[in-house]
Amino acid sequence: MMYANDLVAIREKLEITQITMAERMGLSVRALQDLESTTRRSSLRRMHEKAIKYVVIEYAIERKNPDLLGTLRPDLQNLIMDDFAQMMMRVANLENEKSNTSLRAA
């Protein structure tokens, strides 16, 4: 589970502005500011948590810097890596299906 203070910490680790974070999460800047200013230990909605994870993974890939994840707290690293692993498994399954379809067609 992620909290409002985690959102701020992650954005600061990524060294991005509220504007950039909001755009990447698909939110208005005002909505992001509201999320960041809520009570420190207020838990974020699952959809916001997923969006944050996506932004972190996207930045790690774009910057070719997997160590970026290592700068986060261990519990946040685990949350993000769980989603990343699931995403990579889906990609691998899609690739396998594509290969199998090609083989059958040949």
Image (cartoon, rainbow, N blue to C red):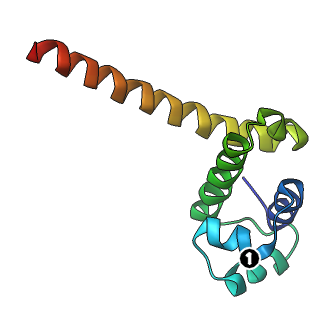
- Farthest left residue? 105
User: Element at badge 1?
Assistant: helix
Number of marks in the image?
1
Q: x, y percentage for residue 6?
A: 83, 59
Q: Is residue 81 above or below residue 17?
A: above
Q: Residue at x 85, y 76 (%)?
A: 39
Q: Residue at x 75, y 83 (%)?
A: 34
- Crowd class of label 1 (few under 14; some 14 to 19; many from 20; radius 10 Å): some
Q: Residue at x 74, y 43 (%)?
A: 63
Seen from the viewer's position, the closer of residues 66 and 79 is: 66
Q: x, y percentage for residue 65?
A: 78, 37
Q: Residue at x 73, y 42 (%)?
A: 60
Task: Please indicate whether residue 49 sits to the left or right of residue 95 in the image.
Answer: right
Q: Say which amino acid is labelled 1.
A: Ile
Q: Is residue 12 above or below residue 38?
A: above
Residue pointed to by mark 1:
19
